[in-house]
Image (cartoon, rainbow, N blue to C red):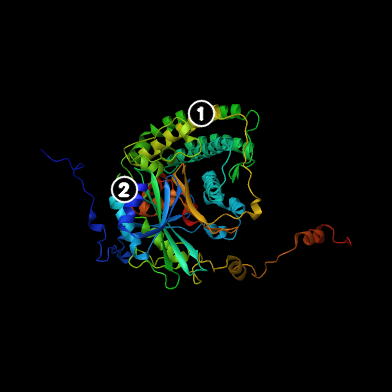
Amino acid sequence: MKEIIENIKIRFKVSDVILQRQNITFMTTGKESAIPLITWLRDYEGFSHFVLFSTVDWNEDGFFQLTYLLNNPVKKVDLGIRTFILRKNAEMTSAHHLWEQVATYQREIKEMFGINFPGSPRVGESFLLEGWDDIPPMRREFDTKEYSEKTFFPRPGRESNDPATYMKSKLYPNEEK
Amino acid sequence: MKKNKLINWKPDRSRFPEMGADGKLNVDLDSQKYIKVWQGPNHPGVTGNMSLELTIGGDEVVEAKTHVGYLHRGFEKLFERRKYIQCFPTCIRMCVPEADSNEYCLATGTEELGGIEIPDMAKWLRMLALEMARLQALLRIVPGQGGTMGLGIGVQWGLYVRELILDRFEELTGGRIYHMYILPGGVRGLLPDGFAARMEDNLKKADQFVKDIQDLMYNNAVFKKRTKDVGYIDPSWVDKFGIVGPVARAAGVKRDVRLDYPYLHYDKLEFDYNIETGSDIYARSMVRLKDLKTTIDLIRQILAKMPEKGDIKALTPNVLHWEIPRGETYVKSESSRGEYGFYMVADGSEFPRRINLRGPSYTHAIPLLEKLLINANISDVSSIMVSLGTCPPEIER
């Protein structure tokens, strides 16, 4: 793993290199160099298995963290490449041409976080949420409790009861205490 | 010499739509050459609820799209509003047939980020729970492959033995499907008295089931005819599509997290990759049958090798006020369907910043299935789908 990291450092500007475990390392790179880096890792360093593409919302800092997790099945190591993009008008270069499943991840991230990947196949198609018209739900500011109360709770005919009071009214209606 | 018409027969492709300049098929439904058929969201046996939007020309599929969302409960969003320990009752619902992989990954990730080392005994018990979970999952999916083509009796036999394994789970954890046995720091309890003997009785029944299902299903002419050379996956697709587990092993590619990245005490057990090379539905079924035999053997090995007593839980801070230091990790395990992992990010608070599940179905049931179904006969759709081990809850999380 050390040799791979040295090779990366020669070619790409990376920071925050963290050896999390013996066989997994995370590192950060710039938005512009993320796709060239993972392409190079796939083509020259044997990271042929694309494990996961994930997003973390650091809303207080105004950034999204995108993590590309790759695996080298021969050397049996994982490598997480992080990059940070602005939350406002969030957009990232598509990596759908590298692995088939990336387009699905990008479609989901577009729907859940509102990050666009221009050129990615079917990126505009809904993934789970047909007819969704609120903010992307995986953004931190989306309040699930408020949404469910607004959408589901005050339905006509639906009542909420305090269990103790309700049981007393049903079982012992004439009891004083 | 006359040519054999059958050998030289080529399907009439004149019905098939042409590809437009944008790469999409020109499907004119008004021409009445094609129809749309929705398979699901009711599932054809052991897969879970998802829909396949199929465009059919004659009885061949010309286009397929996977639609998920019927089981979406927003687990990953809910994690952000729950303390680490409160995530456990939620995470196990992300894969109903094999809930223990979720517990293991979440507990291990939390321990790694929180700097906790678990006792040796807990590692053995975790491994036992994971192998029992694999066994009961395989007892569904192995005969379930036959179920997709009307061979229902094998499913009933498999479910009978599975119920016996669930009895052992109930004895060990108190629960049959959802166990919450593996928690940060260790496990919830030791083996009850006489557990190993009762398990051995059940494993003998499982051995008998393996013999019976071979006669019933794997040597069945109809099953062979409908599974051999159907749903073929080129081995070069394994990396291209992110294929893992039995589906990759059936294509001759050695992928097993237990052997490639040994966790718990898997390096102390004797077993090997279960490989086939046919890469069709039959080969994938055969790999799962071999996995079933391996799992039965592994449970026996674990019960024989594990210590009788020992600490099962490390000292942990009060879980309700446990602040995990800022960091991130990816923890994976081998489920019955392949690599199953959790990407976890902690921000130093009592709540996880992000927990993202990587399940095998994400790649198997969307890009791979959509590709495999093109030119498939409509009657083979559910068989191909089941052979990939699809589990929609882990896609929609």
- Disc number for residue A125: none
Can residue B366 be seen from the camera position used here?
Answer: yes
Q: Residue B168 in the image: x percent, y percent?
A: 60, 35
Asked whether disc 1 touches disc 2, contact meaning CB atoms under 8 Å apart, the reply is no
Q: Which mark is residue A46?
A: 2
**Residue B301's disc number:** 1
Secondary structure at badge 1 equals helix
- The answer to whether residue B18 is above or below residue B390 is below
Front disc: 1 or 2: 2
Q: Position of residue B139 (x, y in %)?
A: 49, 37
User: What residue type is disc 2 on?
Assistant: Gly
Residue appearing at x 29%, y 46% in the figure: B236
Residue sitting nearer the eye, B80 or B313: B313
| Amino acid at circle 1 | Gln
Which quarter of the figure has residue A164? bottom right
Residue toward you, B240 or A169: B240
Front residue of B225/B258: it is B258
User: In the picture, residue B18 is in which quadrant?
Assistant: bottom left
Q: Residue B358: x and y, percent?
A: 45, 51
